[in-house]
Amino acid sequence: MEAIRIGRCRVPFWDVYAVDGEKTSAFQRVMQPVRKECCFVFDQPNETFSISYPCIVKDENGYKMYYQPWYDKDLTPCVCVIESPDGITWHRPDLNIYDGGGLKQNNMVIDHVKDGMFVFYDTNPACPAEEKYKAVGAAFMLHPDGEKKTSLCCFTSPDGYHFTLSHPMTRYGAFDSLNTAFWDGTRYVCCLRSFHNIPGVDNSEVLDLGQIYSHDKVWLHGTRDIRVMYSEDFRTWTKPQMIAFDDGYDYPLYTNNVERYARAPVYVGFPVRYCERPEWTENMTQMTGYETKRKATERIEPRTGRVSTDCIFMCSHDGKNWHRFNEAFLTPGYEDEHNWIYGDCYLAYGMIDSGREYYNLYTVDRHFSFGCAKPLNRYEIRKDGFACYMAGGEEAVLVTKPLVFEGSELHLNFATSAYGYIYVSVLDERGRPLFDGESVEVFGDNIDRRVVFPDSFRLTDHAGSAVRLSFRMRDAKLFSMKFE
């Protein structure tokens, strides 16, 4: 088994990347964020029909959250923005850039879009100042071949308020979703929506927008998927390719929410899982607020009231091959008048560092409760705490693959009960102990605890060589590790 060079990079315990599954008895578990409070209410006249695709942008002034309010199902949405210095208190900026058909939209930044507008701040050092903010979404514009077509397009802005339609990116895909893009340090990455297994359509090739929608509504019977494409300059893109999962399942994913994780060289995603029941059943009638679901079925499309959505967590080291948890990361929660319907659990894109041990995550709820205000609800999730390896009341062990590290200290992000513990052993590449005994007992709950070894053992003596780590634990969760 070839050793993995991790250097001083943080290693999250979310998948088997660094874990020797044959020697490990600890088990994986996805964690769930904790709901805290409503920190803003979308209650303007144009916001009470529906709010879609909030995404968070951090810049030198704090945070912007872009979103799409829909006046009604038949009207074109716009893009608006709210702002916050800390992620807790939000307000509408008084922009007055557009007048939306007589309804003054003080916080509108793009006056009309087709669907799925995503905004990000470009961290590429070579990015021109006038393009530092980029918006990605479906738009109708002139292509190099001289034809006007609907495509995934780029809008640019120097300040995050004044956007100009710039250029088409691709026609390969179906863009009625939140299609994400970012600079990953070496190139641009764009994750976008498409379909496969469309009845009567040759799916052997990457389908463009026209091919997907050319058969009347038959594309709805295909499977919604996620594709990835790359660019050096944000203008010329590779042809999108479907990402792969390691679980053997093939179910619809509506959004992707893929981003580069700030604390480790890993991609993370929080896609919405689309669950459509084939027909209305008695269970739906018994659910709290079933009238809302019935109205959605009648007002939008017959499928809409039969659909429920949740959110899952996935991670990847290369952006193409993903590990995903089929246990939900976020569920609609206990039944009320407004949930268990299409549009639940759409996490806002991006997370805000609290400056403490957790990130802030957000949802805009009551997606299909027409005519009522939409709450922006804040959640907290532990840093690196999206998933873990854990042991219950019986002792278990996690053994890593051979690793090559730098540094002289090992730090853990972990949690135990008062009864629980973690002990660490350092082994050679073949699994033989490098010293007698184990570390000092590790217990408590901390995102950065230094592991103490016997005085006779020095980690620095083994830096640059392949070692394994063995974590013997009981009633404990191990989220990540890092050498320093």
Image (spheres, rainbow, N blue to C red):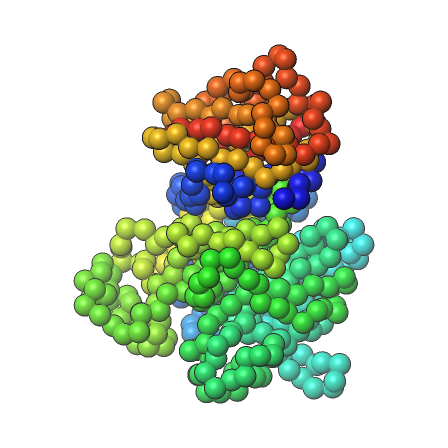
Count of numbered badges drawn on the protein: 0
Q: Is residue 272 above or below residue 409?
A: below
Q: Is residue 126 above or below residue 167?
A: above
Which residue appears at 64% of the width and 54% of the height?
318
Q: Is residue 284 left or right of residue 313?
A: left
User: Is residue 54 visible to the viewer in this orientation of the structure?
Assistant: no
Instruction: Choose top left, top right, bottom left or bottom right for residue 462.
Output: top right
Residue 43 point in image, percent of width and height: 42, 57
Which residue appears at 61% of the width and 76% of the height?
206
Which residue appears at 66% of the width and 56% of the height?
182
Which residue appears at 57% of the width and 63% of the height?
243
Tell which of 40 and 382 is nearer to you.
382
Instruction: Choose top left, top right, bottom left or bottom right for residue 276.
Output: bottom left
Residue 339 point in image, percent of width and height: 32, 58
Residue 469 point in image, percent of width and height: 57, 31
Quadrant of the rendering where the C terminus is positioned: top right
Quadrant of the rendering where the N terminus is positioned: top right
Residue 265 point in image, percent of width and height: 65, 45
Q: Is residue 66 left or right of residue 390?
A: right
Tell which of 323 and 143 is nearer to you.
323
